[in-house]
Image (cartoon, rainbow, N blue to C red):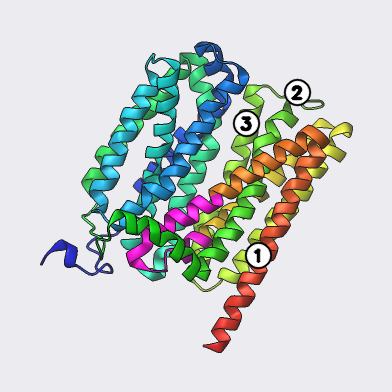
Amino acid sequence: MNASACPEETRVTRPPVRLFAMATAVIVLSLWLAQPLVGMIGHSLGLSGGAASLVTTLTLLGYATGLFALVPLGDRLENRRLILLTLGADVVCLLAAASPLPVPAFLVACLLVGLTATSIQMLVPMAAAMTPEAERGRVIGNIMSGLILGVMLSRPLASLIAGHFGWRACYLALAVAVALLAFALARVLPLRYPPQRTPYPALLKSMAGLLRDEPVLRRHALSAALSFAAFNAFWSLIALRLAALPFRLGADGMALFALIGVSGAVSAPLAGRLADRGYGRRVSFAAHAAVASSSVLVWLGGSLIAPHGRLPALLVLGVGAILLDAGAIADQALGRRAVNLLRPEARSRINGLFTGLFFVGGSLGSAVAGAAWARLGWNGVSATALGFAAASAMAAVHRERRAARCLAAA
């Protein structure tokens, strides 16, 4: 029987969840490792502060481009080959970024590093296709916990490696790690052909139709985007607050604070598992309550308590960070589970749309929080996070009411 004729639901193997989680954790490092190294990279290359910021901007721009332009190829091409080719290209781009290239070539390499890092979003639908529906939430949650761990660990790891071996060593070490993962994945990934071989231009054109025709995708993407905006509003500016009085934390102190938030990553597999058991609505409520309450706590810790005691303020900020991470990550895990239960023939496009939209939300949160910091300081950042958290909660309530009405009508 031709492999391309096999029904999508036929699964010859279960996904290697730990390997997938490790892969997403490692690959996502390339998106964020440059953030704490911008000053070092700019000084090394002779760039001004504004020009040095292009390193992270172009990397994230490449990732956003890949979500809408590269990930949909999973609905046209054989998935195993597509993933391994993208990983191979990622290794080449990371090695180029680690080389002594001219500045324009280095910036192009940063753009391509972000573009090829979208192999993460090819692994998630592959895992969904290899998993029975009753277990899909748990599996996707476990893989997403690896992704979040990579995001949270990227800053302290990059600072540690660059401090001892230079910033180019970060790209070199990551290239080696991705190459090793590619070899490991090549041994376990099965062949998976899409049910349909839609031409590429038609794939891109169909994405607008998918967004229009799939209310589950729209509503979960909106909720996740707003939660991620609150998440980014906090984490984009917390380093500036911790560097100021009364905290005066250095690089090591900020790395330790970032590690506190990693504990929130356990919410992804827990949320997925509870959703598989029919508790999705309750988990959604708890996730949005956690994000909203965290916004209040980080305001208290950074503004009201800070002048009266450094340690109590850090404790409140840490609890707020844990709740924020747990809530935003749980909401994202619920969304990924829901959208991966939609059309199997369009799973890669749907996953790319979902990720791209909440990624846009995160960028919006960073931008608004930056402007709020410039005008109102930490009060403005906290208000921004709370505003996005409240909007996400309202979107989720509306979503659940619509789902309940549809269920009742059915």
Q: Amino acid at mark 2?
A: Arg
Residue topped by disc 2:
248
Magenta span contains residue 196 = no
Which numbered disc, 1 or 3, marks the residue closer to the eye?
A: 1
- Residue at (82% x, 43% y) in the render: 300
Q: Position of residue 17 (x, y in %)?
A: 36, 52
Q: Mark number for residue 379?
A: none
- Residue at (65% x, 36% y) in the render: 236
* Magenta span: 335-358
Secondary element type, mark 2: loop
The reply to whether residue 254 is in sight is yes
Q: Mark number for residue 256?
A: 3
Q: For marks 1 and 2, give the CA distance.
A: 38 Å
Q: Position of residue 19 (x, y in %)?
A: 34, 46
Magenta span contains residue 356 = yes
- Residue at (70% x, 42% y) in the render: 368
* Label 2 crowd bin: few (<14), some (14–19), many (20+), radius 10 Å: some
Q: Position of residue 209 (x, y in %)?
A: 44, 65
Q: Amino acid at mark 1?
A: Ala
Which numbered disc, 3 or 2, marks the residue closer to the eye?
A: 2
Residue topped by disc 1:
395
Q: Earlier in the sequence, mark 1 or mark 2?
A: 2
Q: Amino acid at mark 3?
A: Leu
The reply to whether residue 312 is in sight is no
